[in-house]
């Protein structure tokens, strides 16, 4: 079976679950699991770009994750800074960075300044790349995105009562992002949470028992296989 997605556009969206459980099984602190998760994400990016996946979207930090213990939040934020700083690798793999989440200048945004700057820098430093688009969802929640899109659609519609599908599409955080072909959730959880609820309409779903730090090349191929023929 052809695992190369060469001539068609394939969008994989990942809910990277199970970092804590990965660490617990090894008698390590949860933070070590997140560190291993970030390292694995860098590997997944490399493999997906080699497979000619056109879009990889990852749930890095949700609008609900802010209530985790402050030390854990601080650690996860530092890992985002690390990921956004991997410019050399991203450029070597021709990967363009994109971000979705509550816009920095709007009420409700919680993204601290150092992460805002890291995101903006990574977007600028990879803007010339023409290969895979890596979209990181940070301070992201699908319901917040959809409420904002509906509000803006109403304001932009000539007839306010007529909110159309196109108007919602145009007012998502990243309107150019194509529909998701396959959603992945690791760690044996069979649910979607608050992730890309509009964009995953019609997508295949790949649930795996593997925790995120153990999500490897073979698993990526299993997810890609689901998109063949769709
Ligand atoms: C789930 O693990 C993962 C997260 C809360 C998101 C953070 C993801 C990473 C740090 C991976 C690297 C990604 C980026 C973008 C830097 P969990 O804590 O919910 O695990 P558990 O369910 O086993 O406790």
Image (cartoon, rainbow, N blue to C red):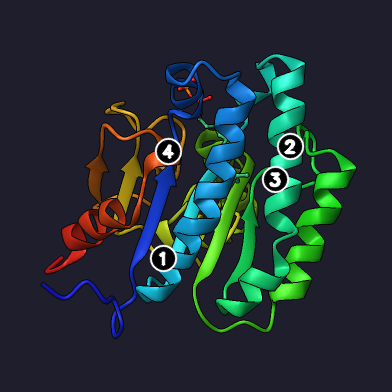
Q: CA distance from mark 3 to mark 2?
A: 5 Å
Mark 2: is the Cβ under 8 angstroms from ligand 1? Answer: no
Mark 3: is the Cβ under 8 angstroms from ligand 1? Answer: yes
Q: Quadrant of ligand 1?
A: top right
Q: Is residue 164 above or below residue 14?
A: below
Q: Residues within 10 Å of mark 1 (few under 14, many from 20)?
A: some
Residue 97 lies, in percent from the top left, at 63, 65
Q: Report the residue that reaches farthest toward the right.
A: 113
Residue at 81 percent of width and 55 percent of height: 118
- Dot 1 corresponds to which residue? 47
Q: Report the residue that reaches farthest toward the front.
A: 26
Query: Which quadrant of the rendered structure holds the C terminus?
Result: bottom left
Q: CA distance from mark 4 to mark 3?
A: 16 Å
At mark 1, the secondary structure is helix
Residue at 21 percent of width and 55 percent of height: 222
Q: Nearer the viewer, residue 163 or 58?
A: 58
- Dot 4 corresponds to which residue? 212
Q: Is residue 154 above or below residue 53?
A: above
Nearer the camera: disc 2 or disc 1? 1
At mark 3, the secondary structure is helix
Residue at 58 percent of width and 45 percent of height: 38
Evaluate if marks 3 and 2 touch, with contact meaning CB atoms under 8 Å apart.
yes
- Dot 2 corresponds to which residue? 77
Q: Nearer the viewer, residue 21 or 196?
A: 21
Residue 157 lies, in percent from the top left, at 57, 58
Picture quadrant of residue 56: bottom left
């Amino acid at each position: 079976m052809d695992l190369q997605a060469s001539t068609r556009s394939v969008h994989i969206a990942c809910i990277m679950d199970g970092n804590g459980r990965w660490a617990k099984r090894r008698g390590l602190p949860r933070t070590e699991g997140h560190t291993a998760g970030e390292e694995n994400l860098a590997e997944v990016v490399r493999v997906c770009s080699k497979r000619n996946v056109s879009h990889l979207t990852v749930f890095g930090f949700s609008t609900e994750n802010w209530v985790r213990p402050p030390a854990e939040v601080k650690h996860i934020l530092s890992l985002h800074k690390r990921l956004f700083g991997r410019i050399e690798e991203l450029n070597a793999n021709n990967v363009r960075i994109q971000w979705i989440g509550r816009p920095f200048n709007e009420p409700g945004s919680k993204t601290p300044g150092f992460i805002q700057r890291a995101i903006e820098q990574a977007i600028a430093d990879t803007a010339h790349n023409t290969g895979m688009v890596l979209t990181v969802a940070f301070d992201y929640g699908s319901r917040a995105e959809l409420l904002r899109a509906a509000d803006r659609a109403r304001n932009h519609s000539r007839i306010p009562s007529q909110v159309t599908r196109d108007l919602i599409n145009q007012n998502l955080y990243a309107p150019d992002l194509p529909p998701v072909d396959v959603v992945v959730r690791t760690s044996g959880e069979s649910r979607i949470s608050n992730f890309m609820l509009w964009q995953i309409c019609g997508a295949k779903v790949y649930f795996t028992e593997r925790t995120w730090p153990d999500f490897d090349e073979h698993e990526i191929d299993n997810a890609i296989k689901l998109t063949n023929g769709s």
